Image (cartoon, grey):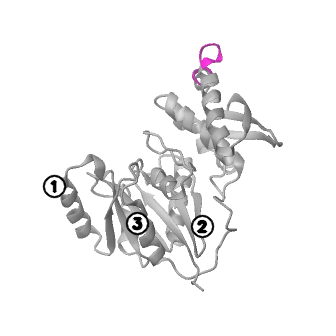
């Protein structure tokens, strides 16, 4: 019998380097928000890849930043956790990057006792000379890391990196049931899908001042009925989210419904409401409610 391998593979890096794209490429499912805006991932999201003789538990984390308010501090706590339970650490950078935005995190990577794979992403948009310069730069900074050039978007070198992860994983039984895809409940993915549409369609501060709470999720054989509330911090933001005669909110609802029907493979009916929840990003009770402070 082949021996079974299991372990936690945690992805860290600066905002917008492609961590969520990589996670989804490994999983084959859209679990993490992907947009061109920075700081789209707020939570630590586990995605599980199962084989007959392995279980890889991937962890997508928020981009590393210097926190400006309490929600961002909680986001960085998720990143700290990713260092504590990793069997393999994936440090993701993109062409042109020189360092992490937080020196303390970088020192942790440099002194890591666990295997570190440095994934140099977005090589499809670079010249060979620039790529070679980047490899030399990172070899000098992180001599303990294996460097793998990849394109998460184009799926280049992804299979090779996954095979290397399997080689590095310890022998262990599975941590989760073999048919499980993630550790998050259905409502979490409803919230994230709605939030993704807001990130795509609204500008400036609006997407970052928004949180989504799904208050009802009722499923029967043919349809899922969902009632979700979009929280904003100010009355002016509420008006912008709703739009002229509700047109902007309607667009969010239609696009979220289409994605959720693909995700759940079932008809979805969704109702959206907007509420003002003043300064929720700096309120520890509200942050706990939204799953930031555990």
Is 211 a magenta residue?
Answer: no
Query: Which numbered disc, 2 or 3, marks the residue that appears first in the sequence?
Result: 2
Quarter of the image for the N terminus: give it. Answer: bottom right
Q: Position of residue 150 (x, y in %)?
A: 34, 57
Q: Position of residue 80 (x, y in %)?
A: 51, 64
Determine crowd level at label 2: few under 14, some 14-19, many 20+ residues with C-alpha closer than 10 A.
some
Q: Nearer the viewer, residue 93 or 213?
A: 93
Q: Which residue is mark 2?
A: 50
On screen, residue 122 versus residue 86, left or right, reads left
Q: Which residue is mark 1?
A: 129
Query: Which numbered disc, 2 or 1, marks the residue that appears first in the sequence?
Result: 2
The residue drawn where x is 42% and y is 49% is 15
The residue drawn where x is 66% and y is 33% is 257
Q: Is residue 16 visible?
A: yes
Determine crowd level at label 3: few under 14, some 14-19, many 20+ residues with C-alpha closer than 10 A.
some
Image mark for residue 161: 3
The alpha-carbon separation of the residues under discs 1 and 3 comes to 22 Å
Query: Which numbered disc, 1 or 3, marks the residue that appears first in the sequence?
Result: 1
Task: Determine the image quadrant of residue 89.
Answer: bottom left
In the image, residue 225 above or below residue 159: above
Q: Is residue 279 visible?
A: no
Q: Position of residue 275 (x, y in %)?
A: 69, 29
């Amino acid at each position: 019998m082949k021996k079974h391998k299991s372990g936690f593979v945690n992805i860290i890096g600066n905002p917008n380097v492609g961590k969520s794209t990589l996670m989804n490429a490994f999983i084959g499912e859209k679990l993490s928000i992907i947009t061109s805006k920075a700081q789209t991932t707020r939570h630590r999201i586990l995605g599980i890849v199962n084989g007959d003789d392995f279980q890889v538990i991937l962890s997508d984390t928020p981009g590393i930043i210097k926190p400006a308010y309490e929600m961002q501090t909680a986001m960085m706590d998720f990143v700290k956790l990713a260092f504590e339970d990793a069997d393999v650490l994936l440090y993701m950078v993109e062409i042109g990057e020189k360092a992490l935005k937080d020196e303390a995190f970088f020192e942790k990577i440099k002194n890591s006792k666990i295997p570190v794979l440095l994934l140099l992403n977005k090589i499809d948009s670079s010249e060979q000379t620039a790529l070679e310069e980047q490899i030399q730069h990172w070899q000098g900074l992180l001599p303990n890391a294996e460097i793998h050039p990849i394109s998460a978007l184009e799926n280049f070198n992804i299979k090779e990196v996954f095979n290397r992860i399997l080689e590095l994983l310890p022998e262990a039984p599975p941590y989760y049931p073999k048919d499980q895809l993630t550790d998050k409940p259905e409502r979490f993915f409803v919230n994230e899908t709605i939030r993704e549409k807001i990130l795509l369609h609204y500008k400036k501060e609006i997407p970052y001042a928004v949180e989504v709470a799904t208050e009802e999720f009722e499923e029967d054989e043919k349809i899922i009925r969902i009632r979700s509330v979009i929280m904003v911090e100010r009355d002016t933001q509420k008006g912008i989210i709703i739009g002229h005669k509700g047109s902007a909110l309607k667009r969010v609802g239609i696009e979220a419904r289409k994605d959720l029907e693909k995700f759940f493979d079932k008809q979805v009916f969704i109702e959206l409401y907007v509420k003002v929840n003043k300064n929720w990003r700096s309120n520890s009770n509200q942050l706990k409610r939204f799953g930031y402070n555990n």
